[in-house]
Image: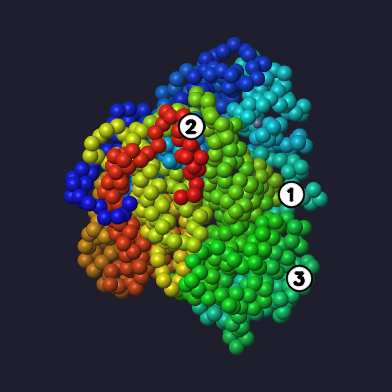
Amino acid sequence: MMATVNGLADDVSNLNLNQTGEGSMQHETKKHRRPNRIYHNFEMAGPSFDRHSPSSSQQSTPLMQQSQIPYSTPLSNDNPYHQAGTSANGLGINGLSINTLTLSAPQPTTTHFVSAQRLESQQTMLRRTFMTSIDSVPPLSTTQYYAEDQGTADPRLMSLSMYNVPNDEHLRAATKLPVGVTVQPFAKLIPVDSIPIADATADSDGPMRCRRCRSYVNSRYQFTFDSKMICNLCHIKSNVPVKQVSPLGLNGLRADAYERPELLKGAVDFLVPSSYNISRENAPVPLHYVFLLDISAFANENKSSLAAIEGIRTSIEYMVENQPNCKVAIIAFDEWIRFFNIRADLEQTQEHIINDPKDIFLPINKGLFALPSEAMHVIQDVLVKLETYITDERFLHRSQSCYGSALEAAKLALEAATDNQGGKIIACLNTLPTTGRGNLSLMRDDGLKKHLRCEDEFYKKLAHDFLKSWIGIDLFVTSTAYIDLAITSYPVIATSGHLHHYSNFNINKDEFKFVNDILGSVKCTVGYQGMLKVRCSSGLSVYNYYSESVKNTDEDPVIPVLTRDQKFDVLFKYDDTLKVGEDICFQAALLYTDIDGVRKVRAINTNAAVNSNVIEVFKFINQDVVSSIMIKDVLATLEDCNFNEIRKNIDRKIIEIFTQYRALCGGSSGGQLILPDSLKTLPMYMLAFEKSELMKQNKSSSRGNERFYDYYKLLFYGASQLSYKLYPQIIPLHDSLNEDDLSFYDDKMQLLQFNNIETLSVRSSHRQLINGGCYLIFQGESCFLWMNENTNLMLIRDLLSYEGPINQLDIFGGRLPDLDTDINIKARNVIKNWSQIINIDYLPVVPLRPNVDPYYSHVMNQLMVEDKSIELVESFDNYLIALHHDIKENIKNDKYIKIGKSAEDGHENFAQKFVHF
Ligand SMILES: [Zn+2]
């Protein structure tokens, strides 16, 4: 697509983005409303309790329908600006007779520029609550909003790529879009802690479940007077377990409906009986942590080992207050492995050293793990001893590292202490492992090796063993040199852990972030022993889970340790034609043990309508999920990393999607480029993906640290963080802002206001930054403060309490000072808001000054994604022109899938799955 575009000038004059398209697309007010679903249509029918299959009638079986019941007090009361008119109270328990609902939903944004779209989306969600039974396509992942679970889950927990699902594969193929779902089971919600607990331990069989598909009871299960229940996914009737039978009232509701959140809410945590434990013999235990510390010579030299100790100390202190049941162990390694006995009754620690790292065993049986609240004095003793060794005993330092053996030691320790129940390893690594098991001393940064796969049998097996033993690992890498992350971090990738890499680690620059990241690794942990399963209505089934733990297959992913930011993308395939007019339901069930050792199932339910009209399908697309699945699909099929070819394939996919839209929905609108409202920033995000560090050509290094770390981020970042990573947000601080701009709107300080959207949204392009300006730029990890020698010194003084030349300015500790000036407060609000959106407590502020900061051009090249890249990937404007050109060519040459033909006619496309670009 990026071939030379002839007639550029012509195209430019014709380029007029018309997001609303033509004809039926112009009815703004109808957009994004929840597609009509059956339970919105039913009448108050007479009792028909022996109706087996709701699918037999469009009228469904309303008396058994439970999804409309408000659960206790409406949660939206937390939002002072909540509009009563859309409250669940409006539906009420007698809401069963509702025929049509006046729906309110996010207004579509008007721009195809990412920066402005985000602010617009946020602005529209200030005054309303997302009502999950009424609203359909969720706001952007970067938008903060209040939501009320009305029997369908908050979309932050689970959201679909389409809310009008095509009724068959032929129509799906004609959209060129995936039917998929993103599940982030522990996403941060607003209001917080709004997931109720359903105690299902009274019956040894646990929660009510369908006898055929094993789905968990939810608000759309139907109950009959003869003590049966009908599954909303497969429509099979099962007996209600004797202990869980409840009489039905005349209105068809279970008498205990109000005591059972699982019948009212879209997301619920079931407490489950011991039959759900991973081991028959042993009851679950609270989570055990192992801190694994690299104290080899280079780690001590750059002081990363000292910073890590500070991180461990901070984390353990945090645990005393917040995770009081969790136990910890500390193991250090260089060429040897050091274990510490931290039994609470000791006065000081006893150290045990293994000096043959090829032969790993546990030198002590008891005392490796302890509760921080009981053994803090011994733990402090370990940390102080290690600090002394690092700072005062340099002549003893050993340069080699036995990382592989150390991981095995941590695994043995966890297995022994928990009877094979697993736990979490937080490891620091500074040096390529060159001794012991998993020795990589022969590994060089081999330019001939193009792929990013782990080909080392030791680490592959170790990752496999971790999965089997429910052990997860987070890894903090502080090496500047090549460390073959594709291999050394493979156990992290396989166990869905966190990877942090600090290139050019510098204690002054990085310590604060490093310590906070280690603490973050503890803070974000919510449980372990996780296994995910997504079920859906008959007709669709899981094609694959994008998870390395199951090698991207349809097997249920194993997630040894669960964190708040983990996100799982799932792709579906068609087994059958879906019935138009019937809802299609999805349920994600995550079986896990919380950090206190309580076994639970988090069940998350959502649903969509089925439609055979392609225009209606395109109206209800959720771009965040579409782009996430497209990116995952590319990452899953990188093979030999031929990035030129991969870029072409992505371009081709984009052209196909918009050709289909133009041909099937866009009418004949002459020379204009028409992007569907629901997908209008997709080209920009995918172009940014093409410009990512991952896809940079590098003749000498194909597996360098930077490339692999970028690969990791693309694979694992949650939806909002990924959005910022692909397209940074820039907020100008030098413009005159009104009082409300960049201030919090709600009393919980979650929603930031942007009244002056035109001024406040700056596109990520060099041309958009003005000489003398001052900007905050966020790319998902750090906030950059851009300024140059002409930036107003008064502004700098009010912002940073600094007076002097800009090139000598330092932002100590990576934080803005707390001042009570207007601009300082606004800037801190912006950073606080970003950190809330991505749910990471600490975002460092890094100065970004032309001709001053050595990293300036490198960082700017990554940030300014609308510009032509140094690798000559096109600018955004030219990309759209070429896109428009190629769409017109396709239409002219009749190169698109037509609908209305029989499946045989379209066989070639029918068989073509979305996957495999
Ligand atoms: Zn079922």
Q: Earlier in the sequence, mark 3 or mark 1?
A: 1
In depth, the one of 42 and 283 nearer the eye is 42
Image side of residue 198 versus residue 141, left or right: right
Q: How far separated are the C-alphas under marks 3 and 1?
A: 25 Å
| Numbered-mark total | 3
* Residue depicted at 35% across the width and 50% down the height: 684
Q: Tag on residue 278?
A: 1
Depth check, mark 1 against mark 2: the one in front is 2
Depth check, mark 3 against mark 2: the one in front is 2
In depth, the one of 727 and 878 nearer the eye is 878
Q: Earlier in the sequence, mark 3 or mark 2?
A: 3
* Residue depicted at 62% across the width and 13% down the height: 47
Q: Is residue 750 shown to the viewer in this render?
A: no
Amino acid type for the residue under numbered disc 1: Ile
Image side of residue 303 versus residue 663, left or right: right
Residue hosting label 2? 903
In depth, the one of 243 and 38 nearer the eye is 38
Within the displayed image, which quadrant is ligand 1 positioned in? top right
Q: Tag on residue 362?
A: 3
Amino acid type for the residue under numbered disc 3: Leu
The image quadrant that residue 219 belongs to is top right
Secondary element at image label 1: loop
Whether tag 3 and tag 1 are in contact, CB under 8 A, the answer is no
